[in-house]
Every structure is written in C-alpha cells, then in structure tokens.
Amino acid sequence: MSLRTDAAPSADRELRVRMGVTLLFLVVLPFAFVYTFLLLANTVGIALLEWATERPYHGEFYVDPVVLTVVVLGGFVVQYRYGPTAVLGSVDARRVTAEEYPDLHATVTRLAAQAGVPEPEVAVLEADLPNAFAVGTADDGTVVVSTGLLDSLEDRELEAVLAHELAHLGNRDASLMTVAWLLPTITYYLAVVAFWVLYGFYRLLGAGAGGGSRDGRGLAVAAVVITVTTVLTMAVSAMFWVASVLLYRLLSRHREYAADRGAAAITGDPAALASALERIDGRMPEIPDEDLRRYDGGVEALYLAPLEARAFGSKELISTDIFPDSHPPTDERIDRLRELERGGV
Amino acid sequence: MRRRRTFLAAVGAGLATAIAGCGYQAGAGDLAWDGRGARGSTVTPSRSDRTWLADGESLFGVLNQSGRTHDFETGQWHEFSNVHVSVYDDAGDRRWRAETDDRQYQADGEPAVADGSAYLPLEGGIVAAVGPDSEGDDGGEDDDGSEGNGGEVRWTAEVGEPDLRLAASGRLVVAAGEGAVHGFDPDDGETLFTIGVGADVPGVAVDGDRAWARVGGTESRLLALDTDGRRATAALPDGVRWLETAAGRAFVGPVEDGLTWGFDGGGERVVDPEVGGVAGDRPLVGGDRLYHVGRGELLAVDARSGERVWRRERSLPDERVATPDGLYAHGSLPDADGCGLVAIDADGEKRWSASVPDEPGCSGGLFALGDRLVVADDFRLYGFHARRGSRRSVV
C-alpha cells in the first residue's frame, strides 16, 4: 500500500495545494518582513535621525536584494539541512538502533514498507510525556517517540501513531514544517526583545538613571527614539507573526488530518489512532509541568498531539504563544477517525 | 562536534553576508564630516581672516597671524608676524601645515595653489612657496605626542614689487606686479623670466607651462608667455575685466556686444563666444567648459570650439564651484527650504539639491575636493557628499 494511492486522493490534492501556497508565502514573507522594516527605516527612521541629530539626511537605508535572497534561501537550506538535528537536540531525543529497540524498529520497518516510503531512522526521548513526531524528509526522515508513549499505548495504537508519523514523511509536509517555523519564531522573539528593551528603558528612567544634571534634550531624544523604534518593531513583528502563524496554520492543521487519513490507510485501523489520541489527550493533565516545559519552545507544532495550555492550569507555554492552535481539536480528529472507521478505509 | 562547527560556520557566513549587504547609502548633499578645520594654527588668530583655496585635491587655509609668543628655549617672549598654511584632504584630515618665519611678512594679496603647494604673495614683494615637507613628515602626531607640521617653506623669491598677483600650475608660477611679470620654477623658485611691461598687470593666469598676463594702461593687451619667457601679444579692447584659462586657451571678457574672446598659446584670437549679458562676470572653469552664471541665467561654453553648449534660465547661490562633472553652488535655496547645496550636471540639468545643517547654513565658501564638496568658514570645515554614496555588497 502506498500513500500516493490512499483512500482520499482529493484530500491529498488539497494538501499539495496548501503545501505549494505555504512554500510560496514561506519565501515571500521574509522578503516582505525585511522590506517593511526598510520602508520604515527610510521614512520614520530617517525622520527620527534628522530630529535626533539636528541635521538633514538625503540618503537611504538599503538591503542588497541579491544578498537578501542568498541569506533567506541560505537560511532555508541551513534549516532544511540542520533543522531535524536541531529539533532532536532541543528535546534531547536520541537516535536508537534496532538492537536497543527491536520491536519499535521492526514495526517502523514494516509500516514503512506498507506505506511505500524509505525506512526512517528512529529516535527516542526519555519522558513521561506521551507524544511523537517526525522530522526530515521522506528520504532522510526520523520518527521520534517518547518513552511515555511506548509505555502508554497498546501495540495497535502505537502502530497507528507510527503510521501517522510515516504519513507525515510520505506527504513531505514534515520537511516543510521544519523550515516553516523559522519566521514565526524570529518575529515572536523580536517582538519580545523589543518589548523588554522598552520596558527596561522606562524602568531605568523611573529609577532616575542619568542623574540630576542630565541633558534634557538628550534624554528626550533617547526616549522618543527608543519608544518609536521598539513600538514599531513590536508592531511590525506582531503583524508578520500573525501572517506567519496564519501561514503555518494553513498547513499545520490540515496536515494532521491528512496524516490521520494516511495512518488509517496504512494500518487499515482508524479506530486505533483514535484510541491512541484519546489516551494521549487523557494523560496530558497527569504530566508534571517540569517534563512538559522540556518540550515547549518551538517544536510543539510537530507533535502528534498538542501541548494544550489547559492541561497545565495557569502555566503558560511558549509554544502556544508562538504557534497558537497549531493542531486541529483532538476531539474533531477522533470524530473524523471514527467516521472513517464507520465508512471503512 | 564537526556538525556543530559546520552549522556555526554556516550561520556565521549568513550573518556576515547579511551585514555586508545592508547599511546606509549616503545621499548627495549628505554631511560626511565636519569640524576638522578647527585645528590648524599654533596660536589662536586674533582675527578671522583665513583665506581658503583648493587645487581639486587639497584645501588650503591661509591665515595671517601676529602677536606675542613665548620661546621656551630662551625663556623670552617675542613678537611674531607671519602666515600660517593648513592643508586638508577630502576626508577633512590635515595633510600638513607650515608657517613662514616669524620675522617674515604677512600675505598681501591672493595666494595661488597648484599641485599640493601654496604660493604666497608676501609684503615687501616676496613670493613664498609652501609645500609638504621634503622629508616626508605626514603632519600627524609625532612619537612624543606633539603634532608634526609636515610642511615647510620650500623657497622664497624677492620680486621687489608690491601688490603681487599670483597664478600657478605644477610647472610654472607667475607673479605680476606694477610693471613686470615674473616666472618661477615651482620646484626650486629659480627665476625663469622677468618681463617688463611698463604698466599695471591686473590679471594673470597659468595653464600648464603657459602663462597669460592682462596688461592695463593706455593700450590694453594680452601677453602669452612660455617658461622661457617667449611671448606673443594680442591687443584687447577697453573694458576687459577678467582673464581665465581653459583647455590651453586664455579667455577674456567682456568685449563688444556680449562677446568674450579666446586666444591660443600663440596669442591668436581663435574663438569669440557670445554669452550676452553675463560676459562681464568671470566664468567658472570645469574641465573644458566655461560656465557663465548671473542675472538669472546660466550658460556653458565649450572652450575648444567656442560654441555655446547650452543656456538655462536658472539662478544659483553666490558660492559656486565648477568641476568636469558640472557646477555646484551653496547658499540660500528656496527648494531646499533654506540653506543648501545644488548640483548642475554638465548638460545644464539640475542633478540634485539638498538642505544643509544649521551650521554651516548659508555661510562659508564652497570647494570641490575629489568626491566631496567642502564648505569652509573661518574656523570649521564641512564635507558633503558630491554624489550618492556607495553600497556595500559582497556580490
């Protein structure tokens, strides 16, 4: 059985279209982001500079378009090449051999053959958190599972989860997702840094920094320049963060449905995946916060099931800040799988 | 470990590339530097009477100074009266400076500059050549922290005539007084010729190794002189007020009916450009062009053909300078919302205009040095971009 000939070819086409659109905007957005800053630098920035230095400026800030292209595309290449390793490193996942996890390897090998995809590497992360994800490309992918997942699920459920991750690799959306998180993350942290610079500056002012003999104009200039710069940085970053998250969601939610369908097609057992999702979702509130925070911070959108903020009471998660609602509601996924079960795969 | 190094190298290369490809591209008219001209004399001049001149590569500040100074070697105070010369490059850095001897006279007339040296008409009919130190002192700070001069008085020549008018090139220095024209070798001050003319010489000019002198008196005439003193003479009409050189020719004006005349090295009148009402105003020379400016009009004459290349109805501020690229002017500009700079290209079209900071505002003389326009007032220099700056790029 191959994912290319699964039971939902029209849905596959939709995934392809979404991936194409995502890829297009993935390339366009960084340029738009940089040129928006450039536009602001050449309007507001120059005006601020003239006001602060009390002299006219007749030039312009620039970004070499060729260099920008090299940097953006180079960034994607670096992310594409090293992203999977970085993701594995960020959650302390370790690639394991068939000798260490013979059953797991055997299952992955069998399912990969069924799905018609090259056998991926297998990695395990030591955690109670029951979750799994896939990184890399179809030809050079890695399926990651947690020890919590291995301990929690029955064999058929684990098989369904692994099939779901193999479907991500087969659909090639995992590699796209690996590079797609870059802009939301950059814009998010840029806005955060701008906020803290602004906050810190006014805290310093409040503490009386500068002394009684300070230059009134110098301080006013610093206040205006820092305020305008940071507020604009926050505004633009927020704008592009929203755009990039929407772009992310264009693919991130749909790809889960597609992978669910793919897993059902590979195993012929949609109910097993539905059962696995129920079990994982049910266990989330039991996971210690400390364990959860290890997996927070950028790769959450790759997980089989989201790290729902509600599961941790008042504890906030960076993941849900950067990538809100990256996954479809688990209940809806379960419903769709049950429906698939009723209709027959 | 190797993967991490590779990753870091890739990130580092990306960052370097990003930084290399962005920045601020200065616009034409942007201030590039200022303030360096405040350094100069070893004493504070009591009067702000510094004269600024440029030879296209260097800016010369010539200052008459006098007063009392203390000699630490002898422990005595003594009077001094001399000329101080400071020379700056297009970055505003001082190349060298020099002072004439304390007992020498002050400058008494307009100095001339050429090829990095200044020629001073001193009181008592003395010509002094001041240039960079032959020992190569760069004019910066010495090892002990004191500032070196980097310049010296290279030679002096006594002409004996008051009110000297000077002109110079890299190959010939000419001084004209009340009755004679004197030619000197710019390298060593050797007298090349002395020609009595029996009348006042209100104008001299030098182009390469040829000099021209406009002789007044009852019969106004133009002398063309080479370095051996061989001469040719051409009669001039009454009322000629200026003499200028361009493309190896001498031009005078005004002559009848708004004309100017152009002479070759043999004293032959070869062209007579018609410039209308501005014929009486000394033109600016930029490359092979003569630019006549005044009375709300601006026109360019090709020095070789004598043809008027173009004419525009355009007013320019009073401080102007010409280069082979065209004209620049500094002063009050309505479209710059106050004081500014304006550039006119060699085709007569406005290239750009730009406002300038409150200092220098509308004051100060304008000079062209390489890619910089320098506005010089008595104590400060302001360097502006004459054209759009460059962009950094690794590709």
Image: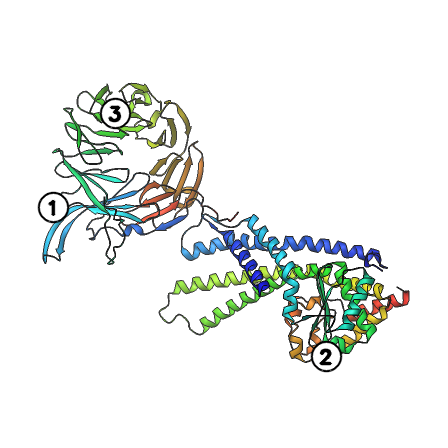
- Mark 3 vs mark 1, CA separation in Å: 39 Å
- Quick one: label 1, few (<14), some, or many (20+) residues within 10 Å? few
Tally the numbered discs.
3
Determine if marks 2 and 1 fall on one subunit. no
Chain letter of disc 1? B
Q: Which mark is residue B103?
A: 1
At label 1, the amino acid type is Arg
Q: Tell me if A104 is positioned left or right of A29 in this view.
A: right
**Where's residue B81, x and y in %?**
14, 47
**Where's residue B394, x and y in %?**
51, 49
A327 up-or-down from B288: above or below = below
Q: Residue furthest front?
A: A99
Instruction: Tell which of B304 and A72 is nearer to you.
Output: A72
Color encoding of the figure = rainbow
Chain letter of disc 2? A
Of mark 3 and mark 1, the one earlier in the sequence is 1
- Quick one: label 2, few (<14), some, or many (20+) residues within 10 Å? some
Location of mark 3 (residue)? B240
Location of mark 2 (residue)? A285
- Dividing the picture into quadrants, the one containing residue B145 is bottom left
- Dividing the picture into quadrants, the one containing residue B248 is top left
**Where's residue A288, x and y in %?**
68, 80
Cβ atoms at labels 3 and 1 below 8 Å apart: no
At label 2, the amino acid type is Pro
Q: Quadrant of the C terminus of chain A?
A: bottom right
Determine if marks 2 and 3 fall on one subunit. no
